Image (cartoon, rainbow, N blue to C red):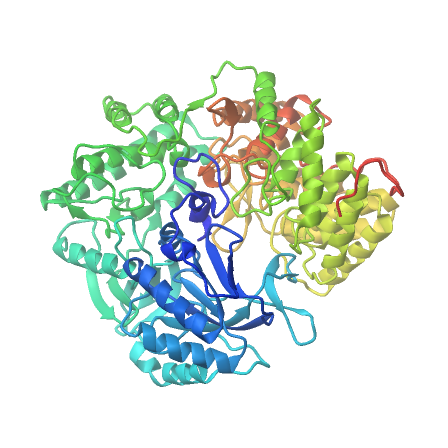
Amino acid sequence: MHDLGLHLTPGVPFFTDADHGLRSAEPYAFVHAELPDGWHRTSSSAVWTTVGRDTTLPPAGWKVHVSTVRREAPEVLALVAAACFDLGVSFKHLTSPRAFDALSSKYAPRASSGKFVTVYPVDAAQTDLVVERLGALLRGRHGPAILTDIAVGGAPVHVRHGAYRELWTVLPTGADALAYAGPDGEPVPDPRSLAFAVPGGVEVPRCVAAAREHRRTNARERTLPYSVSQALHVSAGGGVYQATSPDGTEVALKEGRRHAGIGLDGSDAAGRVRHEADTLRSLADVRGVPRVLGWHEFDDRVFMAQEFVDGCRAIEFVAQFHPEVRADATAAEVARYAERVAGIVAALRATVTEIHRRGLAVGDLHPGNLLLGADDTVTLVDLETAHQASAPVEDGYTVAPGFRVRASSPQHADLLRLELVHLWFLTPQNTYWEFSDGVLERCLDEARDRFAPAPGTFAALRAAAGPRTPVVDWGRVDPVRPDLPTTDLIGLAERTLLSFPVRDARCSPVPVGPGAVPWSLANGAAGAIWTVRHASSPRVGELVDWLGAAAGASARTVPGLFDGYAGAAAVLHDCGDPATAHALLDRAVRWSERVTNPDLARGLSGVGLAALRLGDGSGAERLGRRVADLLESGARLGRGLGAGGSGIALFAVRLFEATGDERWLDLATRALARDLRHLVPRPDGTALVDHGTGRMLPDVLSGTLGVAVAARELGRHRTVADGADVRAAALRVCLVTGWATQGLLEGRSGALAFAAATDGECAATAVARQTDALRRYFCHVGEEVHFPGLLGLRFSCDLGSGLAGAVHALRAVTDPAEHLLPLLGPLPAPVPTPIHDERTCHV
């Protein structure tokens, strides 16, 4: 998730592609400089500019990466370019200072962080020449270490072996990865891992061999006197690790990388960790602030050892104790929770007040920086943004969504954020209220009505709402009015899904999830297009044509149902383009030959289900036999409908319905049993899927609801052990109103769709609750109706987490023809593969 920030453009309420905010950036002067004869520059995105000659590069080689700092970047670029011209070596560089900032920030992709110029030598000998020249030119310059590479040349120069051209290959999981052609012509994945490695069968440059030997002989000097047990948090700026000191004391190690993880104020992670250590030492006697236990410096990073606080994160506290995460919370339990939260906030206020007495302000005060003890003691962690109370009010750091405030002083800002923390414990919707004071006012009303706190509590929270005019201008974002009929709401949402212009095949015609394959089913445009397939608008045909062209022209190698060609094929089939649908299915089947993952979302079961929908029964059975063999041989599975046995069971049930062969029901029974054993009952009558990592999930994709879907479908043909109990527990899950996310696959929309497909009084109650709750998240964004997507950070139109999924759930309430999950319902009447079709096949 560390590339998520590249898709969050300030002031744009939708997820954007990675270079959206960079297209208007002023480039480096070198971009307009005249090139030597025979050289040319190209740019496939707003991030990188490539400079080269008309020579053929090998598919892979020893990339030389140059890192730098912002102030030295223009001069370093000029020096490296001159050396490359002289040596005749192609290179690429970041196009603009804004691109440099994006890839130097705290939450930039760790594998890309620090890379400013990439040079492409043709062989190991030329790699040594390049490193020798650049090492001499750049010695004494500054730049961060590059995590994927090994440092060479005594300068901010680094090397790793990797692909030179864009080439994709499918992985055994069903995901795809960048690759290069090996000696036999077969694609070799380019892992871009954070540990430097030398691949087999390649000549190693002298500079790399020397650097590896230097690293080996100096390893002791870079060893910390701690035993690290786990990473608690990682970013491009460093990590936080739980560790044990030689005397057995548990510590938290905080790492700060030099010249990396650059903040809005220009500070690097190492400087911020040093500042935090100084701050903690000055607050050593303040209750609720951890103590510094050690300090360690290396040439490229620093480490602070601090007191390890044994507590839960605030989000874990809410997930465990908030009354709305249970189906049967009483008024007394709601009141006790509100009282408990008031005590926690009072303890936090006492710590903040004491920090203020020392002349400081906390700065980045939000729930993610709190640890709560078993006795509700509060520890404030991550004080790297603490600053003098006399400092300017403007935020010099990235503020958590929903906690940007306008205040008269830094300490006043702390007090406003303290009140927002209180609100968050009651209604944890900060990413949603980020966009609008109107939404914030609604959250305050809901908290007041639900928790009936002591007089005066909400007066303080409302006082925080007034000054909290959004610092970022999102445009007009207003909650949809409560009395708008649901049918009208659905109509407005469909109009939104049809309103965006169709551009070229690389750009989704609707806002989709961050980093999604733009034409995919779950988080791309295909799901949104499927949702409006019956609309009486010429735009539907345009969208279907776009989907066929975009998927057909794609170089990606993802075969799966949720994020690949199988899903796009199924949508096109349902939308009346069978020729292109079958061509894409052929591509999915071809790529799936390399897949050993039997699951539904990315693996063989999803491809097989698409084959069934398109009438390719024999192909589906071949995939089914492979799934059965993998299951028999002990293939590792996740849990739930998407990645676990439940999805395999659903595919097997559909195979039985298509063939009448009872062996498929045997497979379904075995597969479903894998998930049933991980269902954990709870006292309120619900059950959650235990993923074995501390994650207990209720949702459709990975949780109880998805398991219940598979159990219900299998139960139509064969008795399922405990099947009735599973379905009852799932229906109780649908009574829970405290959903952290709102999507169809992983949130509230899925609960509504499940309840709508179930009969009985309990189901009717759940439908009423979830319909009312879901409607609150629809907003007018300008003239359109939108819905929050992934993590609520931006609005999205996708099916899995955004508007299309919410529309599908609302439709399911009134239209029994809408299956709980698109494309997973009973098979349609078979449609023969066309020999000729009036619609052009795009593949």
In the image, what residue occupies the spot 43% across and 46% down? 22
In the image, what residue occupies the spot 51% across and 78% down? 198
Residue 188 x %, y %? 62, 69
Picture quadrant of residue 626: bottom right
Picture quadrant of residue 233: bottom left
Residue 388 in sight from this viewpoint? yes
Identity of the residue furthest to the front in this view: 37
Q: Is residue 218 left or right of residue 455?
A: right
Residue 174 x %, y %? 65, 57
Total number of numbered labels? Answer: 0
Q: Nearer the viewer, residue 177 or 540?
A: 540
Picture quadrant of residue 688: top right
Residue 445 x %, y %? 36, 21
**Relative to 821, residue 118 above or below:** below
In the image, what residue occupies the spot 61% across and 20% down? 491
Residue 824 in sight from this viewpoint? no
**Relative to 145, residue 100 above or below:** above
**Relative to 497, residue 595 above or below:** below
Q: Is residue 303 left or right of residue 814?
A: left
Q: Is residue 159 left or right of residue 556?
A: left
Residue 726 x %, y %? 64, 40
Q: Is residue 455 left or right of residue 436?
A: left
Q: Nearer the viewer, residue 731 or 608?
A: 608
Q: Nearer the viewer, residue 822 or 306?
A: 822
**Relative to 769, residue 343 above or below:** below
